[in-house]
């Protein structure tokens, strides 16, 4: 899945789904039911929806694995991002200032520590613990050791758990747009 897989019109349509989903939920508490005959948008994809307010993170939710269709995943993760427990629930008066970013993920590929490169989305797993960072996180944590230590901490592991042979790594790419 390369960056040109989705047209600018398809990307715009997905952003409108996220906005309409948030509007309908905030106004009535109901779910927006997106419709399209575009088969690409019904393909199962891993998707994250990130909300920004005043250039700061306001919520982010998603799934790495392709568990549901792209348009339903965009809708559902937009709603979950609005309710991200790290923040107060999104309010209607914030909606006009929200920037929405959608990240459509490729299938995660198992790798080892040496197979992780700057710009990869990374999923780390050990036992029941797991966490992921989207490729864009490298902009804040551009040192590989700091990136992986922070990801381990996010997963509830020790910061050096990425050196443990029991730790599994998966990498993926993302098509992201706002």
Image (cartoon, grey):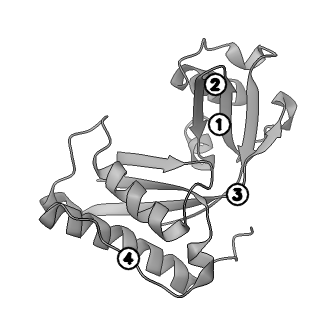
Q: Is any atom of residue 55 visible in this view?
A: no
Q: Earlier in the sequence, mark 4 or mark 3?
A: 4
- The kind of secondary structure element at disc 1 is loop
At label 2, counting other C-alpha atoms closer than 10 Å, the crowd grade (few under 14, some 14-19, many 20 or more) is: some
Inter-mark Cα distance, 4 to 2:
36 Å
C-beta proximity under 8 Å, tags 3 and 1: no
Inter-mark Cα distance, 2 to 1:
8 Å
Q: Which residue is mark 1?
A: 142
Which tag is nearer the camera, tag 3 or tag 1? Answer: 3
Along the line of sight, the residue nearer the viewer: 88 or 127: 127
At label 3, counting other C-alpha atoms closer than 10 Å, the crowd grade (few under 14, some 14-19, many 20 or more) is: many
Which tag is nearer the camera, tag 4 or tag 2? Answer: 4
Q: Position of residue 94 (x, y in %)?
A: 18, 58
Residue at the spot x=70%, y=77% of the render?
Answer: 4
At label 1, counting other C-alpha atoms closer than 10 Å, the crowd grade (few under 14, some 14-19, many 20 or more) is: few
Q: Is any atom of residue 111 visible in this view?
A: yes
Q: Which residue is mark 4?
A: 16
Q: Which mark is residue 146?
A: 2
Q: Quadrant of residue 16?
A: bottom left
Q: Earlier in the sequence, mark 3 or mark 1?
A: 3
Q: Earlier in the sequence, mark 3 or mark 2?
A: 3
């Amino acid at each position: 899945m390369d960056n040109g897989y989705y047209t600018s019109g398809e990307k715009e349509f997905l952003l409108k789904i996220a906005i309409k989903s948030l509007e309908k939920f905030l106004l009535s508490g109901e779910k927006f039911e997106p419709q399209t005959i575009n088969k690409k948008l019904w393909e199962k994809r891993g998707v994250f929806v990130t909300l920004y307010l005043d250039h700061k993170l306001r919520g982010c939710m998603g799934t790495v694995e392709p568990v549901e269709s792209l348009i339903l995943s965009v809708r559902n993760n937009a709603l979950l991002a609005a309710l991200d427990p790290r923040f107060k629930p999104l309010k209607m008066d914030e909606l006009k200032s929200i920037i929405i970013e959608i990240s459509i993920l490729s299938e995660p590929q198992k790798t080892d520590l040496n197979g992780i490169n700057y710009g990869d989305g990374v999923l780390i797993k050990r036992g029941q613990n797991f966490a992921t960072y989207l490729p864009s996180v490298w902009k804040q944590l551009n040192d590989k050791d700091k990136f992986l230590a922070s990801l381990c901490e996010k997963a509830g592991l020790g910061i050096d758990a990425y050196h443990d042979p029991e730790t599994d790594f998966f990498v993926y790419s993302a098509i992201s747009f706002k």
